[in-house]
């Protein structure tokens, strides 16, 4: 495991060094891609100067709202569908083909509906993420071993106790997997939406830098976003791993 | 019989068919009296409705016909206070420690934490699990986990303990030792025990009485009294009369098992 991590980091370092070399030897046109060291300088500038602070706060708030809404609604929807098998059979194919829809075609519609600002972005992030949570919740609830439910019944648990104390913790690994997807999808939805049309936010600033041929700011911002999302994902994964190891699932 | 702890009268269970399948008559009619404090085993060919019998007696399922009484009260669709059930599969909660698992039912029933701790500690050491109190079920062997499931039921101090092939997944040596443990806890708690099993030797070794069930729909064909002393253990298998009991069980069961094999 440690060895794999070492090889992974070595591989990344190698690719970065290769890119650095290719840029400094002018194999690549500097107006297209700037060397990683310059990207890092750009990222540092963004962090240190602080003029992007508003954009960062704006984007993170929007993503947080989208994550909260889609995980809560997805959880409730998934739970409701496991309670209504007939409805579930009816909507199953719709849910399964959800990610075949290019959700972004609805973005202009959301701007018309909610006005330019945070809410069309929340809507696109929500739409993108909610079904992942719904599907994970359904999976998690359906995989609660029957014998645990029978044990709950034999211990005279109420329905609420069974739901909160048996079904929820038993489904937790699947819910967690759903949450990880929700975070990733919400970021994609929000940043891409900002990129297309917004008056503030990280994606908007990247698009702005792009339009002004400000390569340093653009690549710096992209690097910053990558590092942030990777860190967030890694810490979620670490938390998940601890949770699962205790139960012997991984 | 007035001293009957639990009473089954004309109990029948019929499973509705899925879609166009015909309904399955799984069990009954069964009449059975459990005497207070006895150890009764139920043996029968696979698929004969043994587990269904336990489900309706526990109140986990409703019978389609007939009545079940526990301590003079009708059992209707929910598990009455005083009945504890241990299932065949490992039903410990993997996200809780051994201690939390053991105290789970008591905590849900709203018992004070200090009292829970006292009862759980006593039960865990009784079941030889005290040194594993802070472990998670995944860290235990199969036999230990089943012991935990028994401990989890024992903390509620059941007066009637229902066991649905609890040692089915364990190897033969572990089963014999678990049988000894079961006898010990039966003696020390004074509970009435009903054990569902498919192992004739297990039934013959542990029980005061053994009920032999027919192939589906399961009815009781024979009730064998073993006359073992109360302080018996697994060494009883070397008694000459042990062979006689097992032989009688098998002579009834053989034909039924063949019927059951032919229909499966």
Image (spheres, coloured by chain):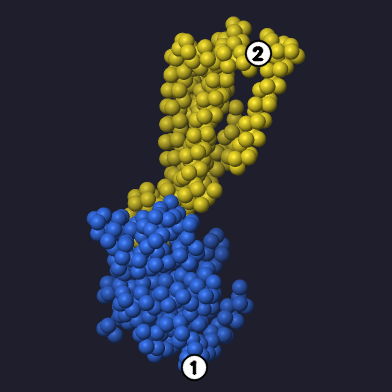
Chain colours: A yellow, B blue
Numbered disc 2: what chain?
Answer: A
Among the 4 quarters of the image, the one containing residue B71: bottom left
Q: Is residue B57 above or below residue A218?
A: below
Q: Residues within 10 Å of mark 2 (few under 14, many from 20)?
A: many
Q: Residue at x 61, y 77 (%)?
A: B261
A95 relative position to B110: left or right: right
Q: Residue at x 50, y 64 (%)?
A: B142
Q: Say which of A160 and B85 sits in front.
A: B85
Q: Residues within 10 Å of mark 1 (few under 14, many from 20)?
A: few
Q: Position of residue A120 (x, y in %)?
A: 47, 21
Q: Residue at x 72, y 17 (%)?
A: A22
Residue underneath mark 2: A34
Q: Say which of A231 and B260 sits in front.
A: A231
Numbered disc 1: what chain?
Answer: B
Q: Position of residue A21 (x, y in %)?
A: 71, 17
Residue underneath mark 1: B240
Q: Residue at x 51, y 38 (%)?
A: A237
Can residue A86 be seen?
A: no
B76 relative position to B53: left or right: left
- Distance from disc 2 to disc 1, alpha carbons, whole Å, reads 91 Å
Among the 4 quarters of the image, the one containing residue B38: bottom left
SS at mark 1?
helix
Can residue B147 be seen?
A: yes
* Marks 2 and 1 close (CB-CB < 8 Å): no
User: In the rendered view of the protein, which quadrant contains the N terminus of chain A?
Assistant: top right
Count of marks overlaid on the render: 2
Q: Is residue B178 above or below residue B108?
A: below
Taking the view exactly as shown, the residue that stands out farthest to the top is: A212
Q: Which mark is residue B49?
A: none
Q: Position of residue B256 (x, y in %)?
A: 55, 82
SS at mark 2?
loop
């Amino acid at each position: 495991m440690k060895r794999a991590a070492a090889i992974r980091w070595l591989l990344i370092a190698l690719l970065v060094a290769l890119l650095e070399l290719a840029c400094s030897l002018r194999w690549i046109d500097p107006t297209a891609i700037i060397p990683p060291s310059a990207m890092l300088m750009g990222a540092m500038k963004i962090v240190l100067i602080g003029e992007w602070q508003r954009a960062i706060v704006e984007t993170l708030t929007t993503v947080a709202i989208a994550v909260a809404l889609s995980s809560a609604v997805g959880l409730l929807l998934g739970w409701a569908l496991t309670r209504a098998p007939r409805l579930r059979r009816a909507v199953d194919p719709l849910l399964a083909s959800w990610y075949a829809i290019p959700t972004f075609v609805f973005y202009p519609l959301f701007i018309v509906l909610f006005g330019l600002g945070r809410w069309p972005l929340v809507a696109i992030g929500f739409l993108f993420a909610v079904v992942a949570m719904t599907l994970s919740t359904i999976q998690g609830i359906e995989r609660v071993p029957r014998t645990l439910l029978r044990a709950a019944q034999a211990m005279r648990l109420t329905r609420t106790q069974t739901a909160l104390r048996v079904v929820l913790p038993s489904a937790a690994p699947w819910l967690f997997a759903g949450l990880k997807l929700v975070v990733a999808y919400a970021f994609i939805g929000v940043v891409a939406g900002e990129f297309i049309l917004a008056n503030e936010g990280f994606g908007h600033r990247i698009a702005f830098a792009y339009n002004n041929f400000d390569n340093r700011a653009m690549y710096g911002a992209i690097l910053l976003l990558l590092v942030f999302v990777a860190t967030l994902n890694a810490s979620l994964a670490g938390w998940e791993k601890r949770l699962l190891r205790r139960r012997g699932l991984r | 019989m007035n001293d009957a702890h639990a009473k089954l009268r004309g109990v029948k269970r019929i499973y509705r068919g899925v879609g166009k399948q015909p309904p399955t008559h799984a069990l009954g009619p069964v009449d059975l009296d459990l005497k207070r404090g006895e150890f009764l085993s139920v043996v029968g060919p696979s698929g004969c409705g043994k587990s269904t019998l336990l489900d309706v007696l526990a109140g986990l399922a409703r019978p389609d016909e007939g009545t079940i009484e526990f301590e003079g009260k009708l059992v209707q669709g929910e598990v009455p206070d005083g009945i504890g059930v241990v299932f065949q599969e490992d039903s410990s909660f993997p996200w809780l420690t051994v201690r939390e698992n053991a105290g789970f039912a008591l905590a849900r029933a709203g018992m004070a934490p200090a009292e829970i701790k006292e009862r759980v500690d006593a039960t865990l050491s009784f079941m030889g699990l005290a040194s594993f109190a802070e472990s998670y079920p995944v860290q235990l062997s199969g036999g230990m986990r089943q012991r935990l499931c028994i401990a989890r039921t024992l903390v509620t101090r059941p007066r009637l303990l229902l066991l649905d092939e609890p040692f089915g997944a364990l190897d033969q040596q572990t089963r014999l030792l678990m049988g000894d443990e079961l006898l010990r806890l039966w003696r020390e708690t004074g509970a009435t025990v009903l054990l569902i099993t498919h192992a004739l030797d297990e039934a013959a070794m542990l029980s005061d009485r053994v009920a032999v069930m027919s192939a589906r729909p399961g009815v009781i064909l024979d009730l064998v009294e073993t006359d073992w002393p109360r302080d018996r253990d697994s060494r009883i298998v070397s008694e000459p009369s042990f062979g006689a009991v097992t032989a009688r069980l098998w002579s009834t069961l053989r034909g039924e098992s063949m019927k059951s094999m032919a229909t499966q």
